[in-house]
Amino acid sequence: MAKIQVDKRTINQFHERQKDLTQKKDPARQKKLHELTSHYLQTTSEEERNQFSKDYMRTLVPIVDAVYIDFAMLYDIYLGALLLMHQDSESAFSYIVSQLPLYHNSLDGLHAPYFPDLQVSEEELIKYIQNNTDVVFLQSPPTSFWINLAALARKIHKENIVAAQVHGFKQRKVSYLINTYPFTPTVSAMKTFKIRFTFGIFQDAFDFMPFSCDPRSMEDFIYTVPKYYFMERFNDWLDEGSISQEKIKNGALEKAIVVAKPLVTEPTVLSEIYSYTIDQITELERNTTLLFNIFTEFHYYRPTVICFNSKESKQDKSK
């Protein structure tokens, strides 16, 4: 019998048919399974079958080489800047805390407008962060995502131990790509943050790699290597004409898992969004999730600030 070329898609289809036939104890199906197995063995070499098995196992037990995270998903630098701008005012602190429920449920990607009594514009807030980047990055309150990061890192670490054993690889370090864009803290500030980042995580199992780059035009490997992406503004990655949009359209993220903060950028929807009921917003998020799942496995996650200290409470703790 002439040998035929069997590609990865064929072997995956074979495994699916084999699973289906095995589950159903039909004599005709069992006979068909025997025929398929015989044909597969006769038309492939042992080397090809071994390679197919390895490729198939890689799809079942993937190795995580990298994780992409926007810094603003870890620490709320915008809220941190507002707190620093009014750090001598306990009344401002109380006001900020009172506005948090509204702020956490925002959908427009803005920050200052949810604290109108502070009389700070969005532009002034951004300018303050640009002028005080290191202080803001190191003193901003952590989010719920940051609090759960150590558990996620341990989960990835354990999965990689299993994957390395399955594939016969030496366990590799996971690169955590932390994008601070649109701000650029100093190397010194990032070294300090790295100490926090490593707390509770297997320090010999990861590389901490901070950088600042517009996600619409990053290095090619950032669009293809990470298994997980935690994004503050996924919509920006789909900007018309951007490198990121082209990469995503061509399947760069099709095997990745993307977790992003809910964000509405369509002007017509933005003008009406705050008159929507909870059910309407839920439906909008569901439909958007279905749309984004064309390009990747997509999930929404809303990071919130769980706790932080006022100046007064900090002073009390220092006594």
Image (tube, rainbow, N blue to C red):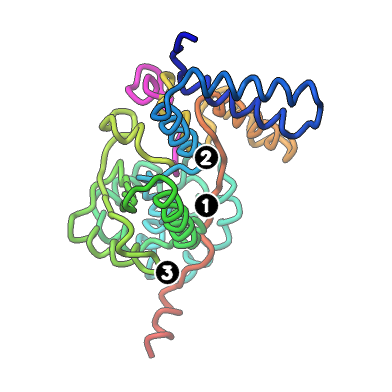
Mark earlier in primary sequence (2, 3): 2
Real-space Cα separation, disc 1 to disc 2, in angstroms: 30 Å
Separation of residues labelled 2 and 3 (CA atoms): 55 Å
Q: Quick check: 125 above or below 214?
A: below
Q: Decide: few, some or many residues near mark 1? Use Cα within 10 Å; few <14, some 14-19, many ≥20.
A: many
**Residue 243 colored magenta?**
yes
- Rendered residue at 45%/44% (across/down): 230
Q: Which numbered tag is attached to residue 303?
A: 1
In the rendered image, the residue lying farthest to the front is 1
* Image location of residue 73, percent across then percent down: 44, 50
Q: Answer left or right for 40 relative to 200.
A: right
Q: Which residue is tagged 3?
A: 89
Bin the neighbour count of mark 2 within 10 Å (Cα to Cα): few under 14, some 14-19, many 20 and up. few
Residue 115 x %, y %? 50, 52
Query: The residue under label 1 is which amino acid type?
Result: Pro
Q: Is residue 236 visible?
A: no
Residue 187 left/right relative to 249: left
Q: Is residue 238 visible?
A: yes
How would you rate the neighbour count of disc 3 (Cα within 10 Å): few for under 14, some for 14-19, many for 20 or more? some
